[in-house]
Image (cartoon, helix red, strand yellow):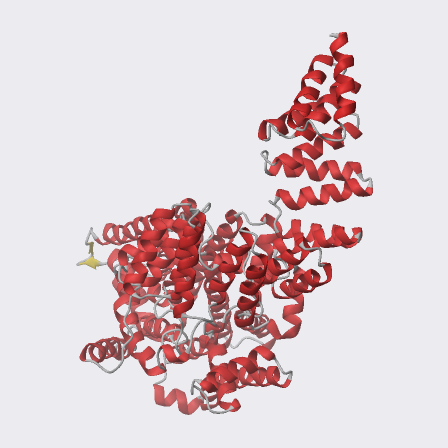
């Protein structure tokens, strides 16, 4: 069917708005800070190696990592290799994916209504075709729903928007298949959409496992497309029905087999985890453990979840309240959004739980009863609830309520609201427009947009985000804990201590005492810091972080034996504790025990291949051993790990000087000085290099800049004296710096020769 020119122009204008409006809505988040898990996944956490080294990412994929969110990791890697650790590029890609999803919702709705027999009356009722307003309003609602801000503003939530992109793309390809089926098209035309669906399925499963409900959505659309009764559909397509229902079970079997393979490979971590859970009585056999891990893997369970926290039944009952009160409530009334909603875990069936569950069931049943005349309402409702199943059913997640869980379900909510707004905006009474319909629909969208902008402001910094969460969940220790961390990172130590003490009032926790110890240490209260860390160990003697921080304190005050004992305790409870391993290596490096230091550095790098301090220290070790080649290699890896660090560039520059590579040394030292204009060693050494290159005037200026930072550096005074005396022939300045050198170090070996020069210069002046 040929689309009229007017409709085409209308469509292009709609798509232009779908692209431009979200850009305007999200301008205020483009420079927002990395938040929370971003530090683990992107900045310097234990998982950031996946994006910083493409070789390691490829190795991760080769060893069964494809279905461990590999597509998500690949997009972060692209961001990192283009823009480093500048949040702008990461936010830009998040916004772009969100816009693409909005466009896909538009295309989906546009193609959907002609394929549903029950929608024919609604589409042309009141003499007006509603396909366009339904598609346009649904797309705008999806783009403007304020509950979506967590997924767009929080970089680590990109997996939710990416998996939705493949979910929607696959659905659009499927609608194309239905058109070909309706038109009895030749098989050759079926190939592109079939391949498209297969590609989307592969990419979706490689992004996030919540994609596994995708076949259920396709089955639902196909059912509504046929116009059959449920009994008639199952009877006619029983094989297809069975295959779709068996897909999650097949995926579960595959994941259980993967766990079995890890056991066969004698994976120490898996064996240790199994032993721990068996001791706690959580599993009885390896088979039970493998099955449980398979279920958790399919549903994307967080590593931090422990089954003793709450049972599957408790989680399911809690999710009834989360979905009915928070998710649906915040879709309809998107105010007071919260990063960390405080939902108590349900321990048993209550009247409120029964009412909430019945309310949702009745809403779906009502949509079912009306599906013969309006199938879009049923599709919207079932899309919403089906897409939420992986995160809001019987398999417990660490966070019982997270706004980004609703992103993949949001197209269902958007279609339902789009249906309502399109009906309101095009409503007619006795052949005349009601008049208030369209303004009312636009007013709803304006309210959504205003709420979106307001919520984005909370995501600008860690402090603003967690201040908002602590205000909305004042009885939740996590919000005050993370607000304390945000204050601590901003050097607001008094405010941090206040928040940590609020956590202790809610629930005395060992890690909170550790944080108090860290703040006291930064304030210079070493005794109080040690006291807080011992309080943490009284609660949890196996807390590696507390042992590590004690090691840091003893290391700083020069008590190396006690520092070593504390670091050893830390790695005994956490064998891959990179920072503790690095610090142990550093102590042995200071003691010139190079082999022992190398052993710890190697262990640290196995845990975090891009740990900056370890790479820098290992390079220094190789330089001490005279292994210039490996020293240069590790300095370069350190720079790659942290391109903004002047220390690694300074160290590489000094290595180039030792090799006689003056030009390369100059480049590294200049970059170190640019990165930190107050880095005195880089300026002083750059002055030495400039003298070798006979750039005497610039060398003098560089030395002077170094002296402004460290006026008592006798070596720079001596070098300036020699520079003015031998090369610039400024005897007054030479005499000034030579005298200052003797004043600072009158007993040095070179004092005699300087005195002679001073005497000669004094005669001439």
Q: Is residue 420 left or right of residue 216?
A: left
Q: Position of residue 470 (x, y in %)?
A: 30, 56
Q: Is residue 7 visible?
A: no
Q: Is residue 60 left or right of residue 482?
A: right
Q: Is residue 447 visible?
A: yes
Above or below residue 637? Residue 666 is: above
Q: Position of residue 553 (x, y in %)?
A: 50, 55
Out of 27 and 77, give the one closest to the viewer. 77
Q: Residue at x 81, y 43 (%)?
A: 659
Out of 445 and 660, give the one closest to the viewer. 660
Q: Residue at x 59, y 27 (%)?
A: 708
Above or below residue 295? Residue 606 is: above
User: Where is residue 149, by image quadrant?
Assistant: bottom left
Out of 144 and 405, give the one closest to the viewer. 405
User: Where is residue 537, by image quadrant?
Assistant: bottom left
Q: Residue at x 74, y 53 (%)?
A: 633
Q: How many marks?
A: 0
Q: Is residue 520 left or right of residue 355?
A: right
Q: Residue at x 60, y 72 (%)?
A: 65
Out of 684 and 329, give the one closest to the viewer. 684
Q: Position of residue 75 (x, y in %)?
A: 57, 59
């Amino acid at each position: 069917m040929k689309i009229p020119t007017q409709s085409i122009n209308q469509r292009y204008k709609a798509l232009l708005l779908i692209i431009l409006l979200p850009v305007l809505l999200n301008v205020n988040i483009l420079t927002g800070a990395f938040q929370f898990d971003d530090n683990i996944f992107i900045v310097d956490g234990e998982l950031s190696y996946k994006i910083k080294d493409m070789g390691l990412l490829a190795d991760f994929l080769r060893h069964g990592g494809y279905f461990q969110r590999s597509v998500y990791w690949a997009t972060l890697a692209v961001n990192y290799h283009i823009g480093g650790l500048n949040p702008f590029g990461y936010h830009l890609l998040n916004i772009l994916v969100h816009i693409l999803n909005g466009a896909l919702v538009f295309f989906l709705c546009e193609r959907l209504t002609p394929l549903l027999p029950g929608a024919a009356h609604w589409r042309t009722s009141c003499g007006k075709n509603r396909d366009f307003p339904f598609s346009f309003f649904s797309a705008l609602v999806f783009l403007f729903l304020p509950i979506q801000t967590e997924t767009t503003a929080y970089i680590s939530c990109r997996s939710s928007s990416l998996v939705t992109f493949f979910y929607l793309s696959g659905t659009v390809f499927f609608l194309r298949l239905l058109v070909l089926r309706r038109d009895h098209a030749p098989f050759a035309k079926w190939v592109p959409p079939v391949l498209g669906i297969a590609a989307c399925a592969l990419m979706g499963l490689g992004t996030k496992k919540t994609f596994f409900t995708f076949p259920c959505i396709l089955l639902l659309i196909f059912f509504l497309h046929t116009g059959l009764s449920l009994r008639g559909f199952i009877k006619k397509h029983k094989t297809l029905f069975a295959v779709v229902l068996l897909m999650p079970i097949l995926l579960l079997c595959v994941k259980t087999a993967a766990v079995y393979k890890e056991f066969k490979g004698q994976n120490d971590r898996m064996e240790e985890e199994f032993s721990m859970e068996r001791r706690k009585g959580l599993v009885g056999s390896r088979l039970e453990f493998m099955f449980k891990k398979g279920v958790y893997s399919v549903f994307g369970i967080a590593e931090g979840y422990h089954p003793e926290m709450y049972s599957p039944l408790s989680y399911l009952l809690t999710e009834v309240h989360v979905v009915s009160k928070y998710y649906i409530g915040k879709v309809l009334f998107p105010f007071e959004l919260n990063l960390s909603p405080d939902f108590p875990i349900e321990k048993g069936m209550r009247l409120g739980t029964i009412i909430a569950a019945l309310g949702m069931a009745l809403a779906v049943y009502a949509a079912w009863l009306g599906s013969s005349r309006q199938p879009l309402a049923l599709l919207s409702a079932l899309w919403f609830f089906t897409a939420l199943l992986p995160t809001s059913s019987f398999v417990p997640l660490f966070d019982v309520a997270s706004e980004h869980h609703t992103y993949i379900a949001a197209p269902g909510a958007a279609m339902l609201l789009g249906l309502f707004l399109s009906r309101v905006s095009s409503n007619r009474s006795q052949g005349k427009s009601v008049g208030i319909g369209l303004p009312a629909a636009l007013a709803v969208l304006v309210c959504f947009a205003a709420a979106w902008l307001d919520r984005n402001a909370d995501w600008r910094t860690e402090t603003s985000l967690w201040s908002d969460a602590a205000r909305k969940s004042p009885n939740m220790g996590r919000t005050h804990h993370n607000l304390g961390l945000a204050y601590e990172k901003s050097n607001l130590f008094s405010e941090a201590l206040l928040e940590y003490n609020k956590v202790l009032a809610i629930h005395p926790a060992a890690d909170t005492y550790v944080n108090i110890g860290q703040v006291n240490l930064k304030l210079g209260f070493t005794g109080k810091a040690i006291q807080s860390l011992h309080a943490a160990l009284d609660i949890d003697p196996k807390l590696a972080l507390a042992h590590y921080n004690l090691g840091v304190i003893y290391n700083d005050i020069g008590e190396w034996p006690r520092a070593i004992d504390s670091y050893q305790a830390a790695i005994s409870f956490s064998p891959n504790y990179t920072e503790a391993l690095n610090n142990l290596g550093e102590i042995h490096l200071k003691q010139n025990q190079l082999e022992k230091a190398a052993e710890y550095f190697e262990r640290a790098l196995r845990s975090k291949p891009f740990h900056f301090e370890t790479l820098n220290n290992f390079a220094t070790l190789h330089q001490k051993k005279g292994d210039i080649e490996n020293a240069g290699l590790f300095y370069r890896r350190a720079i790659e790990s942290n391109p903004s660090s002047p220390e690694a560039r300074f160290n590489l520059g000094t290595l180039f000087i030792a090799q006689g590579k003056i030009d390369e040394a100059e480049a590294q030292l200049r970059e170190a000085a640019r990165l930190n204009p107050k880095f005195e060693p880089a300026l002083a050494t750059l002055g030495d290099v400039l003298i070798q290159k006979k750039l005497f005037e610039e060398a003098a200026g560089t030395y002077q800049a170094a002296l402004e930072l460290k006026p008592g550096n006798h070596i720079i005074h001596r070098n300036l004296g020699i520079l003015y005396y031998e090369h610039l022939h400024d005897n007054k300045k030479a005499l000034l710096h030579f005298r200052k050198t003797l004043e600072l170090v009158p007993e040095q070996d070179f004092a005699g020769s300087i005195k002679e020069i001073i005497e000669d210069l004094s005669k001439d002046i």
